[in-house]
Image: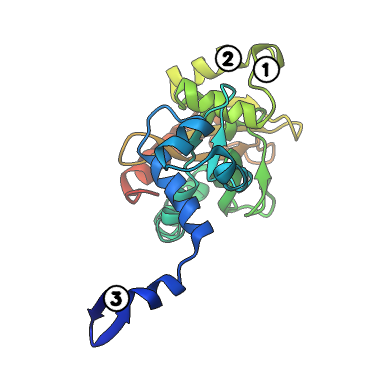
Amino acid sequence: MLVIAARGMTVTMEEDDRYRAPALDKGLDIIELLASTADGLSQAEIAKALDRTPNEIYRMLDRLVRRNYVRRTPEDRYEITLKLFELGHARPPMHRMISQAMPVLRNFALKAEQAVHLVVQDRNILVVIAQVDGPGYWNVSIRVGSRISLVNTGSGHVFLAFASPEERLLMLEEQDMGSPEKMPKGLEARLEGVREQGYEMMPSAQVSGVSNLSVPIFGPLGSVIAVLTCPYTQRLDKLDAPNMPSVLRLLQRAGQEISQRSPEGA
């Protein structure tokens, strides 16, 4: 009988085995295997690599897919998602990003006299995590916590435009638009234009008279980690209010400043 001693405690192998969780071990074995594989594996390949039968891992794979830790590709292969990465990095970096972005958002709202909000992507759903009203007594704004569309908003267009082709396809598949015939007409060309010019400027698909101005927030590795959007409305009662090109320039500067402040892994 093997005895393990650590920090004054003695644990026998028999006692250690008593606390094993075979199902959990099986799931972790699958996740660790897929994490080390670039192109995904079939169910049979996973079973062979783990020295198990396909039937042994079928139910575990099904649960991992349903919980979004693993995805099943159209080629019937399995690959790990970014959910574990998101869980490991979501909270503290997200809070840091919000705290560092808020002064920039307030400064923008004051100078532009417009509302502004910060959007992140949560498993291909866009979520508003911060919002600041303009200084006037009325605003067009969106509540923190709101979930917004990927394909018909300025924020969504920026995320799609700066995604890799593989990431974009996956994002559209989640919206049941992975095939060319299902994509909104002209979306591909629109996204290429957004990527080239570095921002989106489009009429709101939800509110008449509002134009969405959206710019990317880049992380330390060069990927888009958030989007800054101003629902611009023209002031008719204040002739000296900044016009749309001026507000866009202010928004771009705000986006650049937040990008420079963005925490590692946000």
Q: Under tag 1, what secondary structure? A: loop
Q: Residue furthest front?
A: 1
Q: Under tag 3, what secondary structure? A: loop
In-image side of 51 versus 168 (left or right): left
Q: Which of the 4 quarters of the picture holds residue 154?
A: top right
Q: Nearer the viewer, mark 1 or mark 3?
A: 3
Name the one closer to the observer, 44 or 172. Answer: 44
As drawn, the label of residue 1 is: 3
Tell me residue 229's x, y (percent): 55, 39
As drawn, the label of residue 111 is: none
For residue 243, say whether it is visible.
no
Rate crowding at label 1 as few (under 14), some (14 to 19) or many (20 or more) other CA atoms within 10 Å: some
For residue 15, say whether it is visible.
yes
- The residue under label 1 is which amino acid type? Met
- The residue under label 2 is which amino acid type? Glu
User: Which residue bears the numbered disc 2?
Assistant: 188
Tell me residue 9's x, y (percent): 28, 86
User: Which residue bears the numbered disc 1?
Assistant: 183
Q: Earlier in the sequence, mark 1 or mark 3?
A: 3
Mark-to-mark CA distance, 1 and 3: 63 Å
Asked whether the beta carbons under mark 1 and mark 2 sit within 8 Å of each other, the answer is: yes
- The residue under label 3 is which amino acid type? Met
Q: In which quadrant is the N terminus drawn?
A: bottom left
Asked whether the beta carbons under mark 2 and mark 3 sit within 8 Å of each other, the answer is: no
Tell me residue 202's x, y (percent): 62, 25
| As drawn, 28 above or below 220 | below
Asked whether the beta carbons under mark 1 and mark 3 sit within 8 Å of each other, the answer is: no
Q: How many discs appear?
A: 3
Identify which residue is drawn at 61% across, 26% down.
Answer: 172
| As drawn, 65 above or below 168 | below
In-image side of 234 versus 32 (left or right): right
Name the one closer to the observer, 65 or 249. Answer: 65
